[in-house]
Image: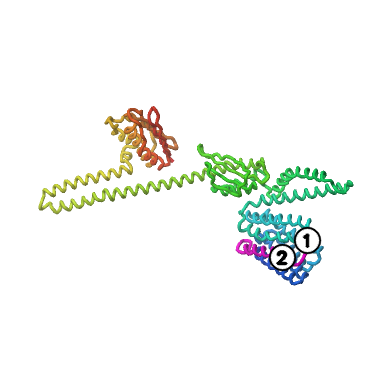
């Protein structure tokens, strides 16, 4: 292979490695980023020297770069740390291998030994990070493992089959290492890398197993005296190997899952890990589930509306219902790992354990949303009431009191010269004052009927409905029934009074009957108000603006209102929470 091809196979990965290192300079992996940039520069320098014709010097620089700054970059990724004595030992091994490796660059046997020691140190560092590192460090290291495993497996097959040309292609594949390391730190959530790692290891092990088995079959046939196996024999062997592919893959994936993500197969430990991370945010809960079960996708929906999702959607999914309220359903959807036909028993058990916690999270979220909406509605109602009061005071009482002042001034100016005109002005002044007092009483009544403070809810209600009449002028016969009521919140009293009077007024106007019943009951949690009439008689009960007003008053205190009509009359039932 000519020097130009070797130089190209060195420069392209070197530039990618330097670019990836530059992307890490402003992150927690800045030390690894600096070493990656240095490695890229060193590799580019070795390619330039090779093109200049100094192959030996280029080989020394190439080996020295790979075994010192490049290997050190792997040790400093995803962050430089000396938390364990093992870290120090790994750095010593890599440094010693790098220092000794450059002078031995042309001695392939000794160089291979040093490279093996350095490679084992780097692998040990990665495993230590997976075992003891933080979540973000483990995820970054998994990205590097994925790149290393994929490139290593493909490169090994290429070298095994094509020797030197395969090695050149394998060197070009190293171009992906730098970007993958940058993604592992800057964008680790780009996709779920853990299933990729597991699948890569599984396919690598399965592929190696079947290649070895096939070679062993051929060797056995050769020992049996068959110089060249027939197509039928090869086809039979291929069928046997193909039949065992999926079972071996499933078994290996379980073993590798347990090896890389040890506590996941244990349902109790996995459920405990998930439960400890479930909070008020459904997205965090989904991430905890995917992390514990190594799933590619998970989502939560309520009433058919998706609230949160995590991961990349897949075709094969399983759904688990979440118990919420009587009229509301939720569900969690999880994506199956590639090749799975269903969830394993352990995974299903974990989801069943954490389902009540997820349901509680969703209920808390829905209650919080209801509270925000209720608060917004209450604030809007208060502002509307303030606007109404301001308008009534400004447009009603304001001009009235101004007129009183002008009339008083006119009476004062004419009292000496024209007593009769002054007397007329005073009579007008008194009439206007009486009207102003009536307007003030109306405003006060609209805010809170004075009878509630003077008499209480039930007597005030009886007094109010006693004056109601039908359109024909007949007095309404209203029976108000209530047991001993405890002291009620002011807002509940007003809401119950307004709803009851409006319901009776609706019956008087629209039901065609002169009989109605009002019943008030309570328990520890709510006040129940029921209004029923004996209609329809000569008319038809027609809900209108009054119905909207009743619903709004019930909603203002967090209650509910139900209205029904049938052949026996109309029914209005309000439930007003006391707490």
Q: Toward which corner of the image does residue 547 lie, by quadrant? A: top left
Disc 2 residue crowd, few under 14, some 14–19, many 20+, Cα 10 Å: some
Q: Which residue is mark 2?
A: 8
Name the residue nearer the viewer: 102 or 375: 102
Name the residue nearer the viewer: 476 or 508: 508
Reply yes or no: does residue 5 show up in magenta.
yes
Q: Toward which corner of the image does residue 54 lie, by quadrant? A: bottom right
Reply yes or no: does residue 184 show up in magenta.
no
Q: Position of residue 109 (x, y in %)?
A: 82, 63
Disc 1 residue crowd, few under 14, some 14–19, many 20+, Cα 10 Å: few
Q: Position of residue 13 (x, y in %)?
A: 69, 63
* Colour approach in the figure: rainbow
Residue at 31% across, 41% down: 450
Q: Secondary structure at mark 2?
A: helix
Q: Which residue is mark 1?
A: 164
Q: Secondary structure at mark 1?
A: helix
Q: Position of residue 579 (x, y in %)?
A: 44, 41
In magenta, the rendered stretch is 1-30
């Amino acid at each position: 292979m000519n020097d130009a091809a070797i130089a190209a196979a060195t420069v392209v990965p070197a530039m990618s490695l330097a670019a990836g290192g530059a992307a890490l300079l402003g992150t927690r992996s800045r030390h690894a980023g600096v070493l990656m940039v240095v490695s890229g520069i060193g590799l580019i320098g070795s390619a330039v020297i090779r093109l200049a014709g100094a192959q030996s010097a280029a080989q020394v620089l190439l080996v020295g770069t790979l075994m010192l700054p490049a290997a050190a970059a792997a040790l400093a990724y995803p962050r430089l740390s000396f938390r364990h004595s093992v870290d120090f030992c790994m750095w010593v091994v890599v440094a010693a291998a790098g220092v000794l490796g450059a002078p031995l660059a042309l001695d392939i046997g000794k160089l291979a030994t040093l490279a093996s020691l350095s490679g084992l140190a780097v692998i040990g560092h990665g495993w230590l990070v997976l075992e003891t590192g933080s979540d973000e460090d483990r995820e970054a290291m998994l990205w590097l493992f994925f790149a290393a495993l994929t490139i290593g497996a493909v490169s090994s097959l290429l070298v095994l089959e094509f020797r030197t040309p395969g090695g050149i292609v394998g060197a070009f594949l190293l171009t992906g290492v730098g970007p993958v390391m940058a993604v592992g730190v800057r964008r680790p959530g780009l996709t779920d890398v853990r299933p990729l790692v597991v699948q890569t290891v599984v396919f690598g092990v399965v592929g190696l197993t079947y290649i070895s088995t096939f070679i062993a079959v051929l060797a056995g046939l050769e020992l049996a005296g068959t110089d060249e196996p027939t197509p039928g024999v090869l086809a039979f062997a291929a069928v046997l190997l193909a039949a065992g592919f999926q079972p071996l893959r499933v078994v290996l994936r379980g073993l590798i899952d347990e090896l890389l993500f040890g506590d996941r197969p244990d349902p109790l430990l996995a459920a405990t890990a998930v439960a400890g991370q479930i909070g008020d945010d459904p997205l965090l809960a989904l991430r905890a589930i995917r992390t514990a079960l190594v799933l590619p996708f998970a989502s939560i929906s309520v009433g058919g509306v998706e609230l949160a999702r995590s991961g990349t959607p897949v075709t094969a999914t399983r759904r688990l219902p979440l118990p919420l309220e009587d009229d509301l359903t939720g569900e969690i959807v999880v994506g199956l790992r590639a090749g799975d036909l269903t969830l394993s028993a352990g995974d299903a058990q974990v989801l069943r354990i954490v389902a009540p916690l997820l349901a509680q999270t969703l209920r808390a979220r829905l209650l919080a949303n209801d509270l925000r909406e209720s608060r917004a509605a209450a604030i809007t109602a208060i502002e509307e009431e303030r606007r109404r009061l301001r308008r009534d005071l400004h447009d009603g009482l304001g001009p009235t009191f101004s007129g009183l002042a002008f009339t008083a001034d006119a009476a004062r100016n004419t009292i000496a010269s024209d007593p009769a005109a002054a007397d007329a002005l005073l009579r007008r002044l008194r009439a206007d004052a009486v009207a102003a007092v009536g307007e003030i009483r109306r405003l006060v009544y609209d805010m809170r009927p004075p009878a509630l403070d003077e008499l209480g809810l039930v007597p005030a209600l009886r007094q109010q409905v006693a004056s109601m009449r039908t359109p024909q002028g007949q007095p309404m016969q209203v029976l108000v029934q209530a047991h001993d009521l405890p002291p009620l919140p002011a807002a509940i009293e007003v809401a119950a009074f307004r709803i009851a009077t409006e319901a009776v007024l609706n019956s008087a106007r629209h039901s065609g009957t002169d009989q109605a019943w009002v019943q008030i009951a309570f328990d520890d949690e709510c006040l129940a108000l029921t209004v029923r009439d004996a209609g329809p008689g000569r008319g038809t009960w027609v809900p209108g603006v009054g119905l909207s007003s009743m619903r709004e008053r019930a909603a203002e205190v967090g209650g509910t209102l139900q209205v029904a009509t049938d052949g026996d009359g109309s029914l209005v039932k309000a439930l007003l929470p006391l707490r």
